[in-house]
Image (spheres, rainbow, N blue to C red):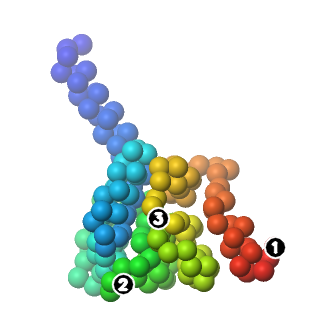
Amino acid sequence: MDSSSSVNRTVGMKEEVEDERPHVLVVDDSLIDRKIMEKLFTNSACKVTTADSGQKALELLGQGEEYKHTNINHQGPKINLVVTDYCMPGMTGYDLLKKVKESSDIKEIPVIVVSSENVPTRIEKCLEEGAQEFILKPLKQSDVKKLRCHMHFTQSIKGRFCIGRYWDSWRQIRGEM
């Protein structure tokens, strides 16, 4: 066997591994927060796409009016998780969450809402609307590791589930405890 065929197989194996990495869409109007989250998810072996607004995130997800036919979910790599800041100008993270969950095309994508403000009514509202988690900023590497179980993978993973960090808090707010 010559060395070129060995190299080709190695490159091919690397491409296959890259394709199986979870793909995260990070949405935040703050460049610094986007870069921090991008680095955290990249360190956890994820592919990351970033958007600086809810509207741009919807366009990337194929839900913007002008971009209905150019979304990355149907023509390119599938998005496995959306992580959005709550407080953004224009479309808030909560508004983005609602649009994702209202769309039959993308409603199965898990959405994580992050915020620097610990407002119980905001947390409850997001969880009731369908957010998998509500996490306080700054996001840490340990938070990202916990989020991996929310990501939808191309192969089904049986018997895997997550219990959110705020599950007990949310149950207390709802009067279930």
Residue sitting at x 25%, y 21%:
6
Question: Separation of disc 3 and disc 2 at Cα?
Answer: 19 Å
Q: Which residue is identified by label 3?
A: 137
Crowding at label 3, few (<14), some or many (≥20) Cα neighbours within 10 Å?
some
Question: Which residue occupies the foreground of this view, 165 or 77?
Answer: 165
The answer to whether one can see residue 130 in this image is no
Check disc 2 and give the amino acid type: Met
Q: Which callout, 3 or 2, points at the residue further toward the start of the chain?
A: 2
The percent coordinates of residue 53 (x first, y second) are 31, 76
Along the viewing direction, whichever of 131 and 72 lies nearer the viewer: 131
Residue highlighted by disc 2: 91
Image quadrant occupied by the C terminus = bottom right
* Mark with earlier residue (3, 1): 3
User: Mark 2: few, some, or many residues within 10 Å (few <14, many ≥20)?
Assistant: some
> What kind of element bears circle 3?
loop
Q: Which residue does the numbered mark 1 point to in the structure image?
A: 177
- Which label sits in the foreground, 1 or 2? 1
* SS label for mark 2: loop
Mark 3 residue type? Lys
Name the spot of residue 172 as percent of width and height, x first.
74, 75
Q: Is residue 117 visible?
A: yes
Mark 1, other Cα within 10 Å: few <14 / some 14–19 / many ≥20: few
Task: Give the amino acid type for the residue marked by disc 1 in the picture.
Answer: Met
